[in-house]
Amino acid sequence: MIRVFNLDMRPEQARFLREPGALPQVLGIEDINLDQVEIFPISDLEDLGLVGYLTEGCAVPADHITADRERLMELTGHVMLIRSRAFGGEETRLTPAEQITFIGAYGEDQTHWTGAQIQADSAKPYSAPRLSPRANRAKARRIGASIFAVVMLLLLALLSKLVGWP
């Protein structure tokens, strides 16, 4: 989940929230992973806008933000996005300062790793044709001899051109 907050504060105050210890204090929590928090002015998004950033940059399905679309488009100033991973898998109750307004929580598209197991014989362990070590060495010798013969013929042709043999 991505939680979106509007920051009703001066730009220098919003920048200060990136400092260690500042954000947990204004959210009323003990600790937070700052790698999972984004704080930025909406103007940085230019033509993309916050709605576009959420749908295209954060993989939030467009239908998840339909109800809040107008509200998201009207926001100005700084915003803060907090991913669920910021709380280290712990259930956390936020009590943000009065300058921080919760806008909404939006789910990211998740990859569904389900599917039928491959039933082909070639997918079974140890299903590759097995040759004896002796057969493998003989095959390698044939390949090596063939490559050697081709290279020698090319060298011979090059040498005959240089010397002027017919």
Image (spheres, rainbow, N blue to C red):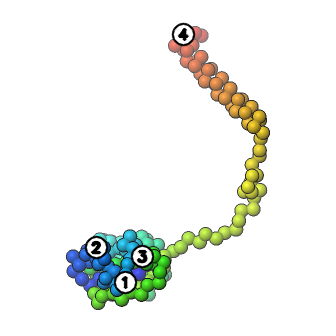
Residue 154 or residue 138, whichever sits in front: 138
- Kindly state the secondary structure of the residue where label 2 is placed: loop
Mark found first going from the N terminus, 2 or 3: 2
Name the residue at 53% across, 10% down: 163
Mark 4 or mark 3, earlier in chain: 3
User: Sequence-wise, which precedes: disc 2 or disc 4?
Assistant: 2
Q: Is residue 5 above or below residue 142?
A: below
Quadrant containing the C terminus is top right
Tell me if residue 134 comes above or below residue 6 in the rendering. above
Disc 2 residue crowd, few under 14, some 14–19, many 20+, Cα 10 Å = few
Which callout, 2 or 1, points at the residue further toward the start of the chain? 2
Name the residue tied to disc 2.
Answer: 19
Q: CA distance from mark 2 to mark 3?
A: 15 Å
Instruction: Say which mark, if any, is on residue 86.
Output: 3
> Is tag 4's residue or tag 1's residue first in the polypeptide sequence?
1
Residue 164 is labelled as: 4
Mark toward the viewer: 3 or 1: 1
Q: Which is closer to the viewer, label 4 or label 3?
A: 3
Cα separation, mark 2 vs mark 1, equals: 15 Å
Report the front residue among 39 and 136: 136
- Secondary structure type for disc 4: loop
